[in-house]
Image: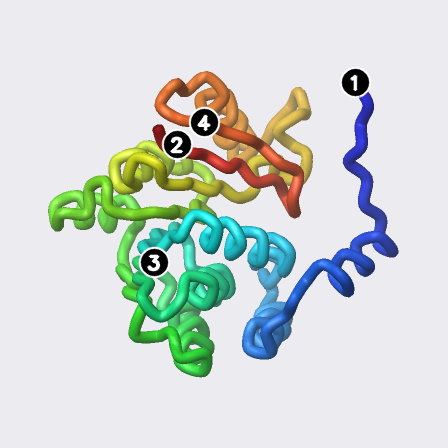
Amino acid sequence: MANKFFIDEKLYSYILEYGIRDNPILKELRQETALLHNGKMQITAEQAQFMGFLAKITNAKKYLEFGVFTGYSSLSMALAMGNDSQSVCLEKNENYIQIARKYWTKAGVNERIKVLHDDALKSCEYLIKNNYLNYFDFAFIDSDKNNIMKYYEYCLLLVKSGGIIVIDNVLFHGEVAQENKSTFANSIHELNKLIQLDNRVEMSLIPIADGLSLIYKK
C-alpha cells in the first residue's frame, strides 16, 4: 500500500497560505497562545477550519468540548456555527478560561459559550443529570489522555444519533504505532482499537495535524 502522507515545511506553508481563510481574532489568539510554554497544545489553523467546515455542512448548533485550553477551537466552532448556536466547554484551568473569555468577548460569541469549570468527568455527570442526554450535534475531545476512553463513552451518551464526535491527537506524535508506547499513547491506541470495532458508530481516522478521528454516532 502506497504511503502518500508527506508534508514538509515548504508544503505546509503553502497549505497555510492557500488553504486557510483566516480570521484576525483567531490569528491574534494563536499568536498569544504561542507565547505560552505549552502553546503547542493548541490545535492547528487548518484543523480548526476543517472542524468548522464539518459543523457547517452538518448544520451543527449544539457543541460540546473537552479541554478548552485558550479557547481557539471553541472560538472557531462558535464562529462557524453562527449566532443561534450553543457551546458547552469543559475546562478546570481558570487561567486558560480567562484568556479564552477575552477572545470570545472580542469576537462577540462569549454569551453563546458556557464553561463548566470542574473535572471533566464530574462535568459529564452534571450534564447527564441535567437533561443533556442525546443533546449535542458535535463533540470535540482534546483533553487529558488517561481518561480519553471515558470521555468517548460519555460522548456517546451526550451526542445525539446522527451527531459527530471528533477526537484529537489520535496519532500522538507517531507513538501509537511504536512497540514501546508511553502511557498516554497506549491509552489512545486502546481507544483507536475500540473505535475501529465499535458498531455504535461509523469512523474515519485522518492524518490532519496530530491525527483526528471522525466519528458518526448511528
Q: Would residue 91 appear left or right of 52 to someone viewing this image?
A: left
Q: Residue 34: which quarter of the image?
A: bottom right
Q: Whole-Å distance between the Cαs marked 4 and 3? A: 24 Å
Q: Quadrant of the N terminus?
A: top right
SS at mark 2? helix
Q: Whole-Å distance between the Cαs marked 3 and 2? A: 18 Å
Asked if the residue under mark 2 is in contact with the one under mark 3, i.e. CB atoms within 8 Å, the reply is no
Residue at x 63% of width, y 60% of height: 45
Q: Residue 15: which quarter of the image?
A: bottom right
Q: Amino acid at mark 1?
A: Met
Residue 41 appears in the rendering: no
Q: Is residue 33 above or below residue 139?
A: below
- Among the two numbered marks 2 and 4 on one chain, the one whose residue lies closer to the N terminus: 2
What crowding class fits label 4: few (fewer than 14 Cα within 10 Å), some (14-19), or many (20 or more)?
some
The residue labelled by disc 4 is 202
Q: Quadrant of the C terminus?
A: top left
- Closest to the observer, 128 or 200: 200
For residue 149, the mark is 2
Q: Whole-Å distance between the Cαs marked 1 and 3? A: 40 Å
For residue 32, the mark is none
The residue labelled by disc 1 is 1
SS at mark 3? strand
- Closest to the observer, 70 or 26: 26
Q: Is residue 167 above or below residue 204?
A: below
Q: Would residue 111 appear left or right of 15 to someone viewing this image?
A: left
Q: Is residue 166 above or below residue 45?
A: above
Q: Whole-Å distance between the Cαs marked 2 and 4? A: 17 Å
Q: Residue 104: which quarter of the image?
A: bottom left
Residue at x 35% of width, y 36% of height: 162
The residue labelled by disc 3 is 89
- Among the two numbered marks 4 and 1 on one chain, the one whose residue lies closer to the N terminus: 1
